[in-house]
Image (tube, grey):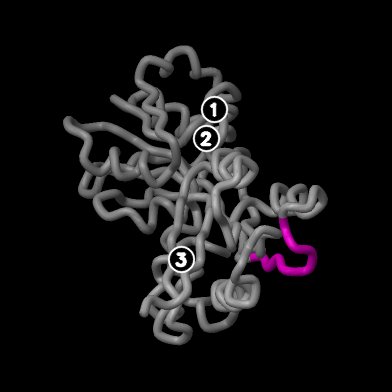
Amino acid sequence: MAGPRLDILSGGAAQGLVRAVEDDFRAGTGASLQGTFGAVGAMREKLLAGTPCDVLILTAAIIAALEASGQVVPGTSEPLGHVRTGVAVRAGEAVPDIADGARLRGALSAATAIYFPDPALATAGIHFVDVLRRLGIYDAVAPRLRPFPNGATAMRELAVAGGHGSIGCTQVTEIKYTEGVDFVGLLPPEFDFATVYTAAVTAGSTQAALAQAFIALLAGAEAQPQRAAGGFE
């Protein structure tokens, strides 16, 4: 007989962390996980549209708003940490200098293609477009922009991109958990961007106690090494 299952809607930044603790959670509880990962705005829309969900992992601001409107159970949220935004290249490619705004501008201007998450619904994608505009190069690089529904997909596409000279920008967690790309570094200090991710039990959960136990595992001391390795601060 199959054990219980938790349904998870999560920002892509937490996908690697969820997968890293999945086996331990199953071994300890007998429960399986069914995760859907993507841009935080898209995951919020899925929840509001009625997609089954026990555990929600989104930015702290979105979780707070959903708690206020009754979609999240008050008192169940736990922060997982800050996730910053960084730059990647395909594994083995030359690493560009992005130490300051001028050098970041040069690296992006020279890129043959630029991979990043949804500029309307993904936290990092919204920020990255703002960075391009602040650098004054958005119009110049627009033909080479390669947006994808979320950062994980963008990094997977960067990993298999043909040719040379492509670059990517998304949250550090999505870079570090993707095979085939190398983490170049964080955005320069003047463009630094960090997002707090939070997990919470949804009001519609039929497995509230199990959902809270999973959140405790994600946010607790036992998973701290996995959080740190994946880019959570």
| Closer to the eye: label 1 or 3 | 3
The disc labelled 2 sits on which kind of residue?
Gly
Q: Mark 2 and 1 residues: CB-CB less than 8 Å, in contact?
A: yes
On screen, residue 116 versus residue 77, left or right, reads left
Specify few, some or many for label 3: CA neighbours under 10 Å numbering under 14, 14-19, or 20 or more: many
Asked whether the viewer can see residue 188, the reply is: no
Q: Residues within 10 Å of mark 2 (few under 14, many from 20)?
A: many
Residue under the image location 40 percent in, 33 percent down: 148
Q: Which residue is mark 1?
A: 129
- Residue positioned 27% across, 55% down in the render: 179
Q: Is residue 116 among what the camera can see?
A: yes
Residue under label 2, please give it. Answer: 125
Q: How many marks?
A: 3
Q: Residue 115, position in %: x, y? A: 37, 33
Q: Quadrant of residue 50?
A: top right
Instruction: Write the start and end of the magenta stretch as one range.
Output: 72-79
Question: What SS does tag 1 mark?
Answer: helix
Q: Are marks 1 and 3 in contact (CB under 8 Å)?
A: no
Residue type (three-letter) at the residue carrying disc 3: Val
Residue at x-position 38% and y-position 38%: 168
The spot of residue 42 in percent (x, y) is 55, 39
Camera-near label (2 vs 1) is: 2
- C-alpha span from label 3 to label 2: 22 Å
Residue 144 image position (x, y, % from top left): 35, 20
Q: Amino acid at mark 1?
A: Val
Q: Is residue 99 above or below residue 107?
A: below
Frontmost of labels 3 and 2 is 3
